[in-house]
Amino acid sequence: MSSLVTSIAAATDYSDHPQAKAFVDKMVTEHKFERTYVQALIDGAVRKQAILDAISRPAEKTKTWSQYRKIFVTKTRTRQGKEFMKTYAKALARAEREFGVSAAMISAVIGIETRYGRNAGSYRVLDALATLGFDYPPRGKFFSKQLEEYLLLVREQQFDPTAVKGSYAGAMGYGQFIPSSYRHYAIDFDGDGIADIINNPVDAIGSVANYFKVHGWQPDQPVAYTATVTAEHNPDIANQKLKPQYTVAELQAQGYQSSVAIDPEQMATIMRLQGDQGIEYWLGLKNFYVITRYNHSKLYAMAVYQLTQQLKQDVGK
């Protein structure tokens, strides 16, 4: 029995993992951490098969727009969003003034990410990032870097590195920032000297708005429009890239027409989505692309956009 326990422990922790050993060396030599401190953290990190399973089937890649929308754009999430906007009206109004991002857009992002803080994740961030950094080869380099950023973050913020919980991908707080985004874009929005997006919704509101501004959000500009197609439209240019790469005039020449009049020189991308009533076509503009910088998925950006529209319609009722 003791040998079985030992083998299980070896399979689920990182005390003898070669990549983990290299990681410890890096934190000591490059960032001047105490070796015993980092080694203890890595020894205590637990490999989670559930994390590896979850990252292999993200909703953004396995569901149609119709299926995805039913999860994220709901009456419940809209109702909770109205409550959130009323509760934090002052902070949202200030963020809108200072960063140019609407209160509804900020709230929609937090609503999509964590149901307004109700579900910020149940995995220890340490376990998530160690599991993906050391045992997920397709993106191991990325997540190992995020583990590095995480240890720098907890040192800066004086967090307990073993206590912080988040998503299966190591994202944290109301707005689900990965460690590098936390360090670069989280701000102290309530003036208490700490940028805490994990427990402080006011800091989270300012941080989401700051993220959007830094990534090029255009205040008071549209996000997306529905489109129609001609029988001769070119299907090959739909769903090519998230970043706008054609002018509206070029898309029109390819058989795609916006539902409203737009500057023909405006840059846009064309999307083809499977909706409840069949195929939908959408023009994504610069602000749509900015949303995808938060999560690289057209389904995610569309959900944020449509929940924003619901909150704009319903807030105050």
Image: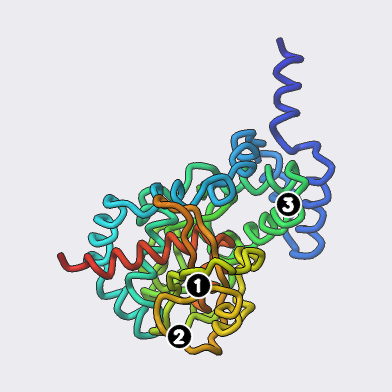
Instruction: Determine whether, in the image, residue 274 is placed left or right of residue 238.
Output: left
Q: Secondary structure at mark 1?
A: strand
* Dots 3, 1 in contact, CB < 8 A: no
Q: Disc 3 or 1, which lies upstream in sequence?
A: 3
How many marks on residues?
Answer: 3
Q: Is residue 179 above or below residue 189?
A: above
Name the residue located 66 percent from the left edge and 45 percent from the top edge: 41
Q: CA distance from mark 2 to mark 3?
A: 39 Å
- Give the x, y percent position of residue 174: 42, 58
Tell me the crowding category of disc 2: few under 14, some 14 to 19, or many 20 or more residues within 10 angstroms, Cα based.
few
Please state which amino acid type lies under the numbered disc 2: Ile
Is residue 203 shown to the viewer in this render? Answer: yes
Q: Residue furthest front?
A: 231
Name the residue located 60 percent from the left edge and 76 percent from the top edge: 244
**Which residue position is annotated with label 2?**
262
Q: Disc 2 or 3, which lies upstream in sequence?
A: 3
Name the residue located 73 percent from the left edge and 46 percent from the top edge: 39
Depth check, front residue: 169 or 164? 169
* Dots 1, 2 in contact, CB < 8 A: yes
Q: Residue furthest top?
A: 1
Q: Residue furthest left?
A: 317
The mark lying in front, picked from 3 and 1, is 1
- Give the x, y percent position of residue 189: 40, 75
**Which residue position is annotated with label 3?**
139
Is residue 162 shown to the viewer in this render? Answer: no
**Which residue position is annotated with label 1?**
283
Q: Secondary structure at mark 3?
A: helix
Please state which amino acid type lies under the numbered disc 1: Leu
